């Protein structure tokens, strides 16, 4: 005769189900969260971008819209857009190398080396934007 | 040194929700984290519940969240967690699993996923007189994956598991790799049907929390990637 030696608890077990858990963030999880955030940001940007194109119907309204894009807030946005695209592309490359070529043992080195490449690309590519912002805020007399 | 040990306690007969309690515990830097818990249980509060058996990193019973990361309590030393007197070490049950009491989680969901990938040799050919042979080179392919002790640290560290409780998770799929890539096994088709699914391989976003958590230092992500490639080629 089988004897059930495990008493059922008075109450069901406490659920810990939640997609958000407090957990130490290391390289891999940081790379993934930044990838998700930049991805969502790029989709949001795409909506704004396409919405802006509706002004293409006539020359006057298009010029008016483009003139608005010279405001400093859009310069900052331009820089963030570049940063998001560069990071998302290079980390995407990292994931491809891990999944397709089995580069998993080098994932941290990959993150930091591609991160360095990203920093250079963002710095060089974003230089005109940053320069125009410095010019706007500090050099314009 | 004396440490401030904080433990997430939960007694279903008394508490409505888990809560933190602190204990002052004398410790040596070379003690295991498990020793801190056993000091609490044996000298301060005998009602503390935890799972442990061999205490030497073989049975895989005492996986839990220690200072915000999943670890095997018996396999981590105090000196690798904190270095100053009075520092805090926090113990909580593995995240995203139902808590039965204190640090003891309900593992049924974890082992259901394990059984789903058919973690046994599938081979309908009659067994030879002595054994099914495998060369050292053939064994090398699965050697690292055979070191898994099923402690659950990886699966409960995985954000995909947190978001989708039905996701098979790294531990179960590592077993799928271990048998699919075993040269004596013929069950590739049935096993790939299970892992090449909505709750299988494609929810692995190479976050590497499983690798960081594994007390046996298994490169789980690497073997899941190999399984992804095999699955993509044969699908």
Image (cartoon, helix red, strand yellow):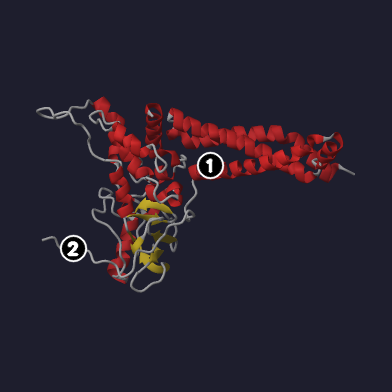
Residue at the image position 36 percent from the left and 61 percent from the top = B99
Mark yes or no: residue B168 visible: yes
Q: Nearer the viewer, mark 1 or mark 2?
A: 2
Mark 1 or mark 2, earlier in chain: 2
Q: Is residue B217 above or below residue A7?
A: above
Image quarter (top left, top right, bottom left or bottom right) of the N terminus of chain A: bottom left
Question: Badge 2 sits on which subunit?
Answer: A
Quarter of the picture holding the C terminus of chain A: top right
**3D distance between C-alphas at marks 1 and 2:** 47 Å
| Residue marked by disc 2 | A4
Badge 1 density bin: few <14, some 14–19, many ≥20, Cα 10 Å: many
Is residue B92 placed above or below B191 in the rendered structure? below
Coordinates of residue A20 in the picture (x, y in percent): 49, 55
Residue A36 image position (x, y, % from top left)? 56, 43
Specify whether A87 is left or right of A27: right
Which label belongs to residue A31? 1
Given residues B97 and A94, the one toward you in this image is B97
**Nearest the camera: B79 or B206?**
B206
């Amino acid at each position: 005769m089988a004897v059930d030696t495990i008493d059922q608890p008075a109450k069901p077990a406490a659920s810990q189900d939640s997609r958000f858990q407090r957990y130490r963030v290391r390289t891999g999880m940081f790379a993934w969260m930044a990838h998700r955030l930049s991805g969502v940001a790029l989709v949001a940007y795409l909506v704004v971008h396409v919405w802006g194109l509706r002004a293409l119907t006539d020359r006057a309204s298009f010029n008016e819209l483009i003139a608005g894009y010279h405001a400093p807030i859009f310069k900052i946005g331009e820089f963030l857009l570049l940063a998001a695209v560069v990071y998302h592309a290079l980390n995407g490359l990292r994931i491809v190398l891990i999944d397709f070529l089995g580069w998993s043992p080098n994932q941290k080195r990959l993150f930091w080396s591609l991160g360095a490449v990203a920093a250079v690309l963002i710095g060089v590519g974003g230089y005109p934007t940053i320069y125009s912002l410095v010019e706007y805020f500090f050099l314009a007399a | 040194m004396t440490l401030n040990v904080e433990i997430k306690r939960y007694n279903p007969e008394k508490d409505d929700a888990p809560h933190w309690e602190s204990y002052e515990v004398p410790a040596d830097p070379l003690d295991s984290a498990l020793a801190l818990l056993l000091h609490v249980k044996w000298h301060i509060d005998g009602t503390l519940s935890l799972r442990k058996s061999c205490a030497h990193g073989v049975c895989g019973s005492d996986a839990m969240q220690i200072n915000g990361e999943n670890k095997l309590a018996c396999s981590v030393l105090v000196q690798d967690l904190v270095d100053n007197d009075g520092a805090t070490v926090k113990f909580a049950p593995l995240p995203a699993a139902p808590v039965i009491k204190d640090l003891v989680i309900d593992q049924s969901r974890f082992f259901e996923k394990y059984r789903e990938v058919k973690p046994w040799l599938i081979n309908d050919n009659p067994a030879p007189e002595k054994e099914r042979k495998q060369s050292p080179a053939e064994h090398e392919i699965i050697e690292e994956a055979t070191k898994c002790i099923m402690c659950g640290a990886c699966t409960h560290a995985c954000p995909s598991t947190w978001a989708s409780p039905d996701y098979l998770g790294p531990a179960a799929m590592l077993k799928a790799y271990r048998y699919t890539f075993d040269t004596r096994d013929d069950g590739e088709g049935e096993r790939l049907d299970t892992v090449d699914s909505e709750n299988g391989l494609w929810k692995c976003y190479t976050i590497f929390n499983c690798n960081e958590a594994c007390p046996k230092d298994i490169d789980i992500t690497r073997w899941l990637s190999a399984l992804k490639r095999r699955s993509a080629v044969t699908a």
